[in-house]
Amino acid sequence: MLTEVVRSMILWGIVFAAAVIAEIATLQLVSIWFAAGALGAFITAAMGKPFSVQAIVFVAVSAVLLCLTRPLLKLIRVKKEIPPTGDDDVGKLAVVTETIDNHADTGRVRIGGVNWRARSDGNAPIEAGTSVRVTAIEGTTAFVRKEETS
C-alpha cells in the first residue's frame, strides 16, 4: 500500500508531466508556470509536508511566476510587422483574365500567377487579354489601369 507521501508525489509528478506536455504542444507559455508550481509541490510532498501545504506551494509558485514573467515576456516579445497582402504587387504588370467592368462589378487579373479580383482606375471597361499595370491593392481587389503601348 502506498503511503500518503508517495501518493502526493505521484499526483504532483502527473500534474508536472501534464503541464510540460501541454506547454510542448502549444508553445505559447500557457502552462509552464503550473509545471514549476507542480515541481515545488512535489518537493514539498517529498519533504513530508501535508497536502494543504503542497497545494499552497503549487498555487503560490504558479501565481508568482505568472505575475513576474508575463509582463517581462510582453516587453521582450518582438512584434513582427506584417505588410498588407499584395503591397509588393503594386506597379507590376498583370493580364486581364475576365473583362473588367466597374459598373457590372466584374473583372479579374492574373498577377505573377495569382488570380485577383480587379477594378479599373477609371470607369472604362478593360477587355480580357489586355495588359494592365497594378496601381493599388485594397483588401483582395487589385486596382489597375491599361498599360500604354508605344
Image: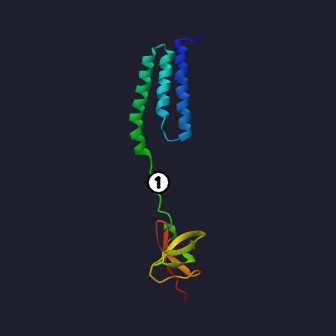
Q: Is residue 46 visible?
A: yes
**Direction from residue 132 to residue 50 in the image, left or right:** left
Seen from the viewer's position, the closer of residues 130 and 43 is 130
Q: Amino acid at mark 1?
A: Lys
| Total numbered labels placed on residues in the image | 1
- Residue 56 lies left or right of residue 94; in this view the side is left
Is 101 or 135 nearer to us in this picture?
101
Q: Residue at x 46, y 27 (%)?
A: 37
Element assignment for label 1: loop
Residue at figure coordinates x 42%, y 17% from the top left: 52
Residue 92 in view here: no
x then y, percent, for residue 134: 50, 75
Q: Quick one: quadrant of the N terminus?
A: top right
Nearer to us in this view, 129 or 62: 129
**Disc 1: which residue:** 80
The percent position of residue 135, horizontal first and vertical second, equals: 47, 75
Single out the residue that lies furthest toward the front: 104
